[in-house]
Every structure is written in C-alpha cells, then in structure tokens.
Amino acid sequence: MKRCCVLLAAIVPATALAQTDFGPLRYDYVAATLAVPEVDEIGIEIDGSTAVTEDLVVFGRYRDFTPDTGIDQQSLQIGVGYVWKINPSLDFIPSLSYADNDIDLRGLRLADEEGLILGGHVRGWMTGRVELGGSVLLDNSKGSSTDTVIEFGLQYFRRANWSVGGRIRDDDDATTVFLGARFYFGASRRPLAL
C-alpha cells in the first residue's frame, strides 16, 4: 500500500498542475516493447488498445520471455477499462482483465495458470509531448496468491501519431524494465502541443 501511495503522490500532482489542455489522451494504439526482467534475460511485449466508446476501452497484451535457461514464459492478457476524466490532462482508468500464463521447459509444459487482474491506472500529460502513467494491479493469474504489481511509465511523443518510452514494473517476483514505441491510429489522433 505504501508503494501505491508513493506512485500516486508522484503522478497526480505533476499532471494535475499541468492544467493546460493538451488535448485528450489517446487510447487507440499498438505498441512493441523489449522487456528486461533480469540482466541476462530479454523478452518481447506486444500490446494494443482501442476506444469502443468515449469512456470504454478494450486492450490486449502478449508477453514472451525466453531466458538462457530454456524456460519459456508466455502471457496473454485481454481486458476492458473505463476512462474517468479527472481534468483535461488527467485520466483514471479502472480495469478488469483475464490473463493466461504458460511456462514451458524445452517444449514440456511446466505450468498453465490463468486468472483475473484488477487494475487502477492513472495517465496524464506533463507537457504537450510527455505523458506520465502509473498503475496498481492486483494479479490473481499466477499461482494461488494475489500479487500486487506497481508500474510507472513515461511516453515521449516524437510525432503526433507515435511515441517512444518505457515503464518499470515491480511485482512480487521481479522488477522489469520495458522500452519501446507506440503507434497511434484512429479518431484519437491529435496535433502535437508544444
């Protein structure tokens, strides 16, 4: 709970003080990311989101880690979120998703776990080119216990329809760094504000 408060204390004031309306946050995107959970490991993550209505978004994520040990970890997540606009530059998104996690060792299935993930996400503009975000997730998709996951991220918009950035994910097992790019499409595109 202490980590959750620190996360919100960092994001909310920074984005709430930016009362300038930089336009709506965008929810129609696809992203490709490199994930580094350990020094000697690397993985990929592909995710996307689209707005079904002005307030409702659906999203999906596929993650694959294949470290040198030969243990292949794959995760597929599909969910829905509700966009609650706190102010023109700050959104809160409660979400619910289903996740399926597979762990294989050289083709032999070691684990096949599934469950639900309940999330609370905060996204906001710092400037017309910089977006901050943070999430607190209760993940019931791995094993019999519920993990608390904290994420903090930043996106820098090089152009109106794409950004580069990353995030740090801290859960009960490891801390993972994600670096990648997003491409935005559809009605949520907007001109850049400087």
Image: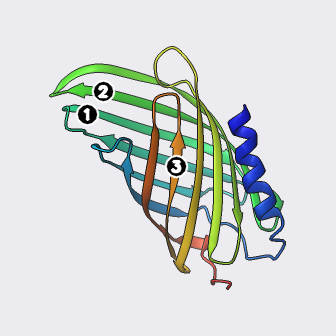
CA distance for labels 3 and 1: 21 Å
Which residue is tagged 2?
103
Q: Would you identify the image quadrant in which residue 131 lies?
A: bottom right
Report crowding for label 1: few under 14, some 14 to 19, many 20 or more residues within 10 A (C-alpha). Answer: many
At x 39% / y 57%, what residue is drawn?
A: 33
The answer to whether residue 188 is left or right of residue 10 is: left
Q: Would you identify the image quadrant in which residue 55 lies?
A: bottom right
Quick check: 185 above or below 96? below
CA distance for labels 3 and 2: 22 Å
At x 30% / y 47%, what residue is drawn?
A: 42
Amino acid beneath label 3: Ile
Q: Quadrant of the C terminus?
A: bottom right
Q: Secondary structure at mark 3?
A: strand
- Residue 59: x, y in percent? 54, 49
CA distance for labels 1 and 2: 6 Å
The reply to whether callout 3 and callout 2 are in contact (CB within 8 Å) is no
- Earlier in the chain: of badge 3 and badge 2, it is 2
Which residue is tagged 1?
72
Report crowding for label 2: few under 14, some 14 to 19, many 20 or more residues within 10 A (C-alpha). Answer: many
Q: Secondary structure at mark 2?
A: strand
Residue 112 or residue 153, whichever sits in front? 153
Amino acid beneath label 1: Asp
Q: What kind of colouring is applied to the model shown? A: rainbow
Q: Secondary structure at mark 1?
A: strand
Residue 83 or residue 178, whichever sits in front? 178
Which residue is tagged 3?
168
Q: Is residue 123 visible?
A: yes
Q: Nearer the viewer, mark 3 or mark 2?
A: 3
